[in-house]
Image (cartoon, rainbow, N blue to C red):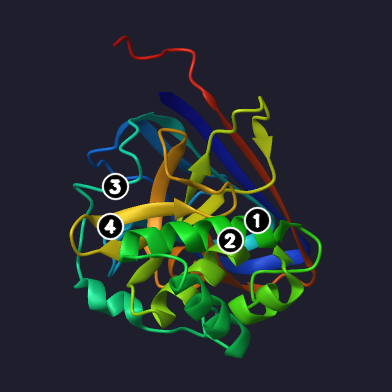
Amino acid sequence: MRIQVSHETIYRYGQPARGVIQTLRLTPRNHESQYVVDWRIDVSENCQVGQHEDAFGNLTHVFDCDGPVSELRVLAEGEVDTHDSNGVMRGVIERFPPSLYLRATSLTEVDGAIAHFARETRTRADDTLAVLHALLNRIHGEMTYDTDPTHTTTTAAQAFALKRGVCQDLTHVFIAAARHLDVPARYVGGYFHRADGVVHQDAGHAWAEAYVPTMGWIAFDPTNGICATDAHVRVAVGLDYLGAAPVRGTRRGGGAESMAVKVLVDQAARQVQS
């Protein structure tokens, strides 16, 4: 499938900011399941945008613009050819051994409820892959997608107690449970092409990858209850959301800040002929 993505973030400041610094993880990389046909980053302010790689091998763009800045627009857009590999990830950049992804973070810390949930799920399956599928199905079935009660700093334990959250929260719960069972797991940020025809979205998407020694890294999407398919565009990985966040930064001055996000994920007009 050829997927077209447009991701625009608009910041408005109550008073002109004296300067803004941001790091963007908005650019996908090639691997065996996807090929980036074209991609561009555009910043509304006149500034130099530098491209780098972070510790995990994610493509990042960094800019520092001087004020006064009353409104800032950051646009990432392009087209990506995707291939369904049944969730098995091959050809991705690996900077660390899988054991690094057993490390807990403040967003993925396990509490008693998640630990019990993970151990109980393990009794329902025979091997690591079956356990991961059981976790996927239970989280998808027992937690409700809801944009109201959580935010970017909500932890896995808090979301699990609510049994509600967005894709970030369900992914954190999956990662926390997997790590409690000594299965390396990591956070993936990207985009998802919905099958219901909805192309305008409020944000990007998130899912997890877990390591199975006999197969390697496998992508699990607990929000949709599936392994990743050709509907997923993989952009960035990290130990949790903070390590793969599409936009992080700071500003000097500016007073109150508002942010609006517009994401479009659709099939491109130009589809690859098989």
Does 68 appear above or below 191? below
Amino acid type, residue under disc 1 in the picture: Gly
What residue would you read off at disc 1? Answer: 141
Residue nearest the viewer, comparing 71 with 198 = 198
Q: Residues within 10 Å of mark 2 (few under 14, many from 20)?
A: some
Amino acid type, residue under disc 2 in the picture: Arg
* Label 1 or label 3, whichever comes before in sequence order: 3
Query: Which tag is nearer the camera, tag 1 or tag 3?
Result: 1
- Percent x, y of residue 150: 74, 69
| Residue contact at pointers 1 and 2, CB within 8 angstroms | yes
Q: Quadrant of the C terminus?
A: top left
Rendering quarter of residue 133: bottom left
What residue would you read off at disc 3? Answer: 88
* Label 3 or label 2, whichever comes before in sequence order: 3
Name, please, the residue furthest toward the bottom: 112
Amino acid type, residue under disc 3 in the picture: Val
User: Residue at 34% of width from left, 80% of height from top?
Assistant: 182
Q: CA distance from mark 4 to mark 3?
A: 6 Å
The tag on residue 138 is 2
| Residue contact at pointers 1 and 4, CB within 8 angstroms | no
Q: Residues within 10 Å of mark 3 (few under 14, many from 20)?
A: many
Local secondary structure at mark 4: strand
What residue would you read off at disc 4? Answer: 217
Residue nearest the viewer, comparing 71 with 226 = 226
